[in-house]
Image (cartoon, rainbow, N blue to C red):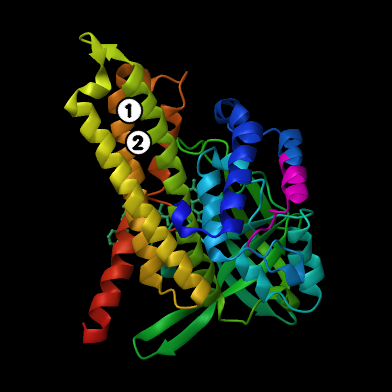
Amino acid sequence: MDLLLNEEQRMLASSLRAFVEQELRPHEAAVDRAGEVPLELGRQIVKRALEMGFYAPNIPESVGGAGLDSVSLAVLEREFGRTSFGLHGFVHRPSEILMACEGEQIERYLRPCVRAERKEFFALTEPGAGSDIMSMQTRAVRDGGDWIVNGSKHFISAPCAADFAIVFAVTGTDETPRGARKRVTAFLIDAGTPGFTITRGPRCAAQRAYPTFQLSFDDVRVPANQILGEEGKGLELAERWLKMGRVWVAAGCCGRAERLLELATEWAATRKQFGQAIGKFQGTSFKLADMATELRAADLMVMHAARKADAGTMQPEDAAMAKLFAAEMVGRVADNAIQIFGGMGLMEDLPVERLWRDARLDRIWDGTSEIQRHIISRSLLRPLGA
Ligand SMILES: Cc1cc2nc3c(=O)[nH]c(=O)nc-3n(C[C@H](O)[C@H](O)[C@H](O)COP(=O)(O)OP(=O)(O)OC[C@H]3O[C@@H](n4cnc5c(N)ncnc54)[C@H](O)[C@@H]3O)c2cc1C
C-alpha cells in the first residue's frame, strides 16, 4: 500500500491507525455486545475526529469539510475497516448528495452535518424494494406548495437515530425510450415532523453496534423547498452517493481482511499441535499465502478506482469491481481465519468471530455481489447493444 501513497497520505494512514488502535479498538467488544455505542463515547469520538481534522472527510473545504481526495478517503476507510463500523460511524462521512443543498438548505442541513451538529439517514431501501429499487412504494403527492409523503423505509442505518432523513419517494412517471419509469425525488425530512416515525430495526448479526432503523411516513407534509436537488432527479443523486460508497465499502473490507490476516498469522506462528507451530503445516501456511495475495489484489483495485475518481474518470463498473472483489475476498479471508483458529475462532473472547460476522454484511449492503455483477456485465454488453 505504502508504494501507492504520497507522503501526506502515508501520514494520514499512520495517524488514523494510531487513533483506531488506541481510542476505538478498546471499545469494540463492548459495543458489539451492547448493540450500540454509548452516546458519551460517541460524543468523545466526534470531538477527537474534529480536533484531528478528519470529521466530514469527504465534504469540500469550501463548506467546512476535511476535503480529502478519493485516495485519502480510501486510506481512511481502510483504517476504520480495522474496527467496528459503529465506532467508525461517529466519524461521520455525510452523504455527498447533501452537496446538492441550495439556498437555506445549506445552513439548515449541509453545514450542520459538517460541523457535527446534525446527522442524516440515507433512506432508499424499503421492505419491498431492496436490490430492485424501482419497486419503491413510498410516494409524495403535491398539495399546494407542499408535498404529502406516505410509505416506509427499512434497514436505514446510522450510529444513532439521525436528525433528518434524505428520503427517496416516487413523485410521478416519466416516459423513456425503455418505457415508463418511476420518477423519484429526494426530500429532506426532519425528525419530529408530524407523521414521521423512527423505530429501531431488528438486531443484525453483523456490525451490531451500527443499528438499523425503520422510518414510516403517514401523511407527512413537506414544503417544496425541502426537495434535495431537482424534482424527479432523486435516483441520479442516489447513484452518485452509492457509486463512491462502494469504493469505501471495498476499502473497509481491505482493512478488515488485513486485521484478520494479522490475527491468523500470529495464531499460526504460536499455536502448537503435533509438536510444532500450526503455521508449519502447509494446510495452514498456504491459507495465509492466499489471504495475503487476495488482500493485495483488492487493495490495488480500490486504489485503481480511487485514483480514477480523483481523475474524474471512474465508471460505475470500476467501483462495482472493487466492491465485488473486496467483499468476496474478506469473506474468504474471514472464513480461513476461523479455520486457522479452530474452535477458538468461534469464541466471543477473541475478535475473529466478530470480524467474520461483520464481513458477511459487505456482500450485501451498498448493493449485493449479484447487483455488482449486473453493473459490470452491463458495462460489457451494453456497448454491443445487448
Ligand atoms: C446493516 C444494514 C444497513 C443498511 N443501511 C442502509 C441505509 O442506510 N440506507 C439504505 O437505503 N439501505 C440500507 N441497507 C439496505 C441494503 O442496501 C440492502 O439490504 C441491499 O441493497 C439488498 O437489498 P435486500 O436486503 O432487500 O435484498 P434483496 O434485494 O431482496 O435480495 C435478496 C437476494 O436476491 C438477490 N437478487 C436480487 N435481485 C437480483 C437480480 N436481479 N439478479 C441476481 N440476484 C438478485 C440478491 O443479490 C440477494 O442475494 C442496509 C442493509 C443492512 C443489512
Q: Residue furthest top?
A: 275
Please state the horizontal and vertical placement of residue 360, each as a whole percent of the image. 38, 41
Give the magenta-colored segment's residue range: 45-58
Q: Is residue 271 magenta?
A: no
Q: Amino acid at mark 1?
A: Ile
In the picture of the structure, the residue carrying the numbered disc 2 is 334
Q: In screen coordinates, is 109 left or right of 289?
A: right
From where the camera sits, is residue 166 visible?
A: yes
Q: Residue at x 57, y 68 (%)?
A: 168
Where disc 2 sits, the SS reads: helix
Q: Which residue is rendered at x = 31% and y = 23% of the image?
A: 268
- Return the x and y of residue 384 as percentages of the image width and height: 21, 85
Q: Is residue 149 left or right of residue 226?
A: left
Q: Can you tell which quarter of the image residue 205 is in? A: top left
Task: List the residue tagged with mark 1.
Answer: 338
Instruction: Using the numbered discs, state the Cα–Cα distance from disc 1 to disc 2 in whole angstroms.
Output: 6 Å
User: In the rendering, at what x and y percent does residue 339 appear?
Assistant: 28, 26
Q: Amino acid at mark 2?
A: Ala
Note whether 282 is above or below 318 in the view shown. above
Front one among 65 and 360: 65
- Is 270 displayed left or right of 187 in the figure? left
Front residue of 259/145: it is 259
